Each structure stands twice: as structure tokens, then as C-alpha cells.
Image (spheres, rainbow, N blue to C red):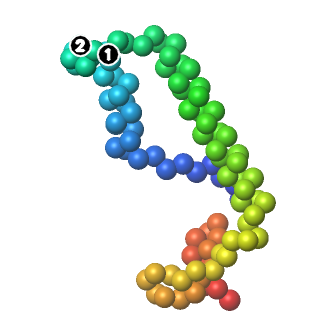
């Protein structure tokens, strides 16, 4: 079985997170009453986020290895309406 680390990143989400991290250091922080957090906060935050992502990936792999026999890999292609088998290589006709 081919296990590759796959992650989909949304550009708007990245921009929103970047804006939220920069906001306390701008002139707008006085309007909202924000105080800039210490730099160590961002190190801890990055460590927690990376740890969370690794843990989610490990649990996801464990789940699909353990329960993949219960998942029906056959589905209907929405364009051609042909029953197909999905796998690591994408859509294939089911035989």
C-alpha cells in the first residue's frame, strides 16, 4: 500500500491565520486592546499545531489500515456513470 503524506492547504485560511498572528503587532492592536504575545508563544503554538497534524495523520493511517475492509471502494463516476473502483491511481473501470 502506498502511503504518502498528503495535505491540502487553503490559501484563504493561510492568509487569515497570518493576519491574526500579525494583528497584535499593528496599529490596530490599540483599537481592539490587543497586547503582543511573547515570541516564545509562537514557538509553542507551532509545536502544538505540528504535533496535532502528526497525530491526526497517524490516527488516520491506523484507522484506514484497520477498517479498510469495511469501506466499499466501488463507486459511480459522476461524469460517465460507469461503476469504477478507486485506488491510489485514481479512477479505474471496475472489472
**Direction from residue 67 to residue 41 in the image, left or right:** left
Seen from the viewer's position, the closer of residues 78 and 3 is 78
Q: Which residue is mark 1?
A: 34
Q: Position of residue 55 (x, y in %)?
A: 67, 40
- Mark count: 2
Please say whether residue 38 is visible from this viewpoint.
yes
Labels 2 & 1 near each other (Cβ < 8 A):
yes
Quarter of the image containing the C terminus?
A: bottom right
Q: Position of residue 38 (x, y in %)?
A: 45, 10
Secondary structure at badge 2 equals: helix
Q: In percent of the image, x 46 and y 46: which residue is there?
A: 9
Q: In percent of the image, x 46 and y 81: which residue is there?
A: 78
**Direction from residue 41 to residue 33 in the image, left or right:** left
Q: Which residue is mark 2?
A: 30
Residue 77's place in the image compared with 11, above or below, is: below
Q: Within 10 angstroms of label 2, few (less than 14), some, or many (20 or more) residues?
A: few
Amino acid at each position: 500500500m502506498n502511503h504518502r503524506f498528503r495535505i491540502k492547504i487553503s490559501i484563504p485560511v493561510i492568509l487569515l491565520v497570518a493576519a491574526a498572528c500579525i494583528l497584535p503587532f499593528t496599529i490596530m492592536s490599540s483599537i481592539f486592546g490587543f497586547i503582543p504575545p511573547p515570541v516564545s508563544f509562537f514557538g509553542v503554538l507551532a509545536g502544538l499545531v505540528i504535533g496535532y497534524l502528526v497525530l491526526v495523520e497517524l490516527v488516520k493511517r491506523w484507522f484506514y489500515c484497520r477498517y479498510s475492509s469495511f469501506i466499499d471502494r466501488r463507486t459511480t463516476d459522476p461524469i460517465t456513470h460507469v461503476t469504477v473502483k478507486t485506488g491510489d491511481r485514481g479512477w479505474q473501470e471496475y472489472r
